[in-house]
Image (tube, rainbow, N blue to C red):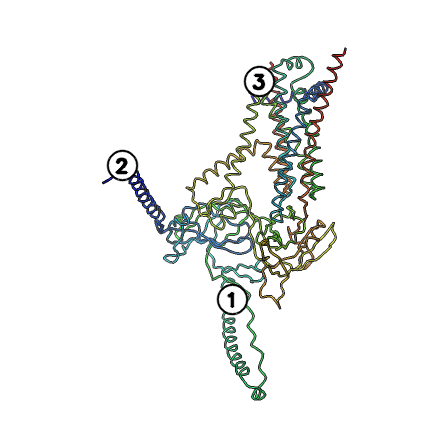
Amino acid sequence: MITRRMAPVIALRCLLTLGLVASLLSMSGHQGARAQYAENPEVANVYGITYFDGLLYGSTMAPPSVDTIYILADQTSFLSLRETIVYFWPLTNQYLADWDSRNELLDSVLEVDGPGGKMEIPLADYVIQYQKDDARSSLRVYLNDDAHAKYDEFVSLSTQYQDALAQYNTDLVVWQQGMDTYLRSTPETIAELPTPEPPPQEPEDLGTMSSDLQRGFPVALPAGNYKIQARDPNGEIIEGSQKSLVVFEEGEFAIGFDIIPEQRWTRPERSSESSSPIYTSANTTIYVQPFWQSRMGAVYDARMRNPQDLTALPGESTWALHEAALPDHLVVEQDGKVIAEVPLESFVVHQVAGPTLGYTVERFDPVSMESESFQGFELDAELISSNPTIRLVDAEGNTLSGSERDLRSLHPQNIGWLYAGAALPLVAVGLVGVFRLRGSQSRSQELEKE
Amino acid sequence: MSTEFSNSAFRSFADLAIGMRPMKAVFRRYTRLSSLQIGTLIVVGIVLLAATAVLQGDLEFLERNAILVTTDPLQTPLVLSVGMISLFLGLSAVIGVTSEVENGTLAVLLSGPVTTSSFLAGIVLGSLVFYSWSLLLVLGWSVLAATIINLHISAALLLMMAASYAVVFAVISLGLLISAWSQKRWTAILVYAAIVLLDIALRVLDRFIGSVPVQSESTRNDPWHFLRSVSGVLDRAVQWFSPFAKFDAMARALEFADYQQFFLQLMGTILFGVVMFFLASWLLKGQRA
């Protein structure tokens, strides 16, 4: 029997139950809405794009939903019209290609219409090769016969390297067995054994990187807006091949720095512009890590890498980072005179124990320490206090583009004096007011006396 | 109408050449206003305190982070100072012109050798003299900051200070145009405030929307893209007309050492000011007729 006293409790329970059911339903609905799957797979023609980003090649594709392709001016990028299965992938909100199911290069000729008039670009075999340690200056693109020759050469070298590596591994096993015998021998028998051979030398790394032999339209155009389309051997325009092609100038190549303060080494700041000085607080030692970068329009850069990108903002520029060889010393100058040359060194970071937390950084000692934390150029507080300029120079003594930075150690504790100076005009207004008031009072007193 | 305006502009140039003496008289009359003298000092005082607060923000970041990488910590305080002082001088010009109209003194002035162009030029010159004093105080503040904080007064900062005259001229000319069109003090003040606030609001909106990170894999259906496109279009439209946006663009151009863009924006600002000035003169002459 339900009494009046129980009614509110029952009502509350009902409400809670309803709430629970509703939340379970909403959760299940939410999960249902989140179930993702490839949507609307269909056979379509897409452009495979092998773009040059200023240092290396990357690849992407332009599905039918994209009407514009972006590539760098005066550099060879490759387009290839392919028939594949395209599907919408809700997890990333992008169209993707199922290359494994279908990937057929369409035999065609690319027609380009733009500032230089109309031109036709036939398909070509190509291969891209570069040296691992200096991709920036060693990168080469080979077409047709050259591509075949270079690729065959690479395959041959690669085979030789693999053989040498296999031989090295065999020799190493034999050498280790010999060493084991030597180490297991007793002092009495060791004199009878021959002196151990030195370990086998590991074959020198191949050093060269190569793409597979590919086929596509080599496109190297001056900056401008173009229209492209592909014709099949019958002279028909291939469906989905008509697109806009934006060819843009590569921005400047320059040195950027990551600046690591000793106290907060986990929070580095990036310095991309040489016009932006690096300010430090008093007694701060910093470590600078240079890198190569190139400036591009944010939209161009993003859509070159992914034609479906919509996140980049027009009118803004971005710096694309590149891995390339860098000098191993930094020149520090004051008033045009070199005051120090700082070598590139390795450092180890230690967390400060206790409640103060923080970090200390010390030079890496390969004998007593296991591994380094980072590499960089150390600029101590005393050096920075002289308001110096830093720059990187190459082997010929030329300053690397955009590598100059001014350093200044600021005194934030003096801000109070600046407030006092800023208040002076208001103080002057107050004083003028007081004098005027006194003047008018004395005049009125004089008038009263008269 | 365009022929009429260009003829009027030529006549205004001729008036300016002939009316140097009356212009000086208007200039002296305008600069003697105690409200302008005291007001400028108060505004500069507030501006310098605000500039110090902005700089303090950078310094607090430096103390927290141990390093600060920025173009010039004195640049934002300068942009703020130029913006606030020019707004005040523009407002003073609005009040100056509409007061003369409402008090009936403008009709008396214009019945003599004073022409509309020399009258407006006198106000502009008077305002620029006050601006020069204000800028001197801002420069003094910058030197003090450089000395005690160990900042550096760059050539770019000095170039920005010189270029700020064009911004101030453009804002004052805008104020003159509004007052010549309205001729009623409160209407002119409200329209002037509305235009300035709209300019600031559109630019802040674009910065805000632009700063909101968009999901890296968003689609064309994402509403943020629509908002960003709309605010981007509005911001680009504002870039054509707003002296403040042009000053901002000048600062950015100097940051990238793009002197061509700097002078383009500078010329654009001066042109904007000249067009506003002669439109104001033409309107005032038309109203008077």
Chain under callout 1: A
Q: What is the residue that sits farthest to the top in this orientation?
A: A450
- What mark, if any, has residue A90 been given in the picture? none
The residue pinned by badge 3 equals B184
A397 above or below B51?
Answer: below
Dividing the picture into quadrants, the one containing residue A371 is: bottom right
- What mark, if any, has residue A154 been given in the picture? 1
Amino acid bearing label 3: Lys
Viewer-side residue, A219 vs A377: A377
Chain under callout 2: A
Amino acid bearing label 2: Arg
Q: Quadrant of the C terminus of chain A?
A: top right
Amino acid bearing label 1: Phe
Viewer-side residue, B83 vs A222: B83
Side of B157 where B210 appears, left or right: left
Give how far apart the Cα atoms at labels 3 and 1 are: 83 Å
Residue A342 place in picture, x, y as percent: 68, 58
Name the residue rendered at 53%, 56% in the picture: A56
Viewer-side residue, A4 vs A354: A4
Are the residues tagged 3 and 2 within 8 Å (C-beta)? no
Viewer-side residue, B115 vs A223: B115
The residue pinned by badge 2 equals A4
Residue B284 place in picture, x, y as percent: 61, 18
Along the polypeptide, which appears first: circle 2 or circle 1? 2
Is the residue marked by circle 2 packed among few (<14), some (14-19), or many (20+) residues within 10 Å? few
Dividing the picture into quadrants, the one containing residue B181 is: top right
Q: Nearer the viewer, mark 3 or mark 2?
A: 2
Instruction: Respond whether the residues carrying marks 2 and 1 are from the same subunit.
Output: yes
Per the image, label 2 sits on a secondary structure element best described as loop
Is the residue marked by circle 1 packed among few (<14), some (14-19), or many (20+) residues within 10 Å? some
